Image (tube, helix red, strand yellow):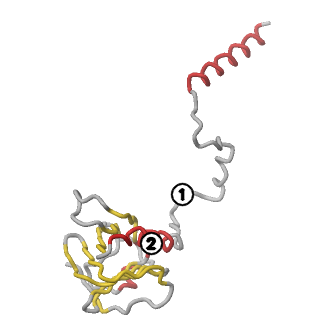
Amino acid sequence: MVVLASFQPPTEGIRHQEPNTIARVKSRDLGKGTLYIAESQLTWVGESGQGFSLKYPTISLHAVSRDLNSFPSECLYLMTDADLESNDTIEEQNGENEEPEDSKILEIRFIPENTETLDSMFKAMMDCQALYPDPDDSSSEDEEGCFDDAEEDSGAEYDVAAAERHRSQSDASHENSHIS
């Protein structure tokens, strides 16, 4: 069961607002409402005024799904570890608390009436999520630039056989210089 609460839509930092959007959590259709993609959080408010909100760090994946074999409608697909099935407050769900050991991934689909807006919904989510980089991300400043010497031509191919021949020739000439 998904627990919905009374929500006021965000008023600041809204990057995209999509009315007439169905929210589907797991296999439960929550009805039509408005999806707000704001800089601070993602909020869906149903026509009844009930809804839910997700902080970006709880969203592990978002994508546009157009595969009608896997789901009957094109949608914005999300995977989150937020708990929408408890009576905890949103602050508790999205706070800095330790991750529960039995955390579950929850699938959410937002199905807009106008599917032509899916790409702009995705872009707005991408921009907002970029404001909250993953603190556990393994890349570090020390690693930046470690591939600066890589081939700049992205279309260039690496000839393994030629490289092996060159290495063999270099090794042979190196050995011959030590034999004399």
Q: Is residue 104 above or below residue 37?
A: above
Camera-side residue: 3 or 113? 113
In the figure, residue 20 lies in which quadrant? bottom left
Q: Is residue 163 above or below residue 153?
A: above
Classify residue 15 as left or right of residue 152: left
Q: Residue 173's spot in the image, x, y percent? A: 73, 14
Classify residue 85 as left or right of residue 42: left
Camera-side residue: 95 or 12? 12
Q: Residue at x 69, y 43 (%)?
A: 149
Foreground mark, 1 or 2? 2
Q: Residue 77's spot in the image, x, y percent? A: 33, 67
Classify residue 65 as left or right of residue 72: right
Q: Amino acid at mark 1?
A: Ser
Q: Residue 79's spot in the image, x, y percent? A: 34, 66
Secondary structure under badge 1?
loop
Q: CA distance from mark 1 to mark 2?
A: 22 Å
Asked whether the residues under the numbered discs 1 and 2 touch, taking CB atoms below 8 Å apart as contact, a structural biologist would say: no
Instruction: Please identify the quadrant where the N terminus is shown.
Output: bottom left
Kindly give the residue lying farthest to the right in the view shown.
180
Q: Amino acid at mark 2?
A: Met
Q: Is residue 3 above or below residue 115?
A: below
Q: Residue at x 64, y 41 (%)?
A: 151
Secondary structure under badge 2?
helix
Give whichever of discs 1 and 2 has the lower sequence position. 2
In the figure, residue 58 lies in which quadrant? bottom left
In the figure, residue 29 lies in which quadrant? bottom left
Are there few (<14), some (14-19), or many (20+) residues within 10 Å of tag 2? Answer: many
Q: Residue 108's spot in the image, x, y percent? A: 29, 71
Q: Residue at x 59, y 43 (%)?
A: 154
Question: Label 1 belongs to which residue?
Answer: 138
Question: Label 2 belongs to which residue?
Answer: 125
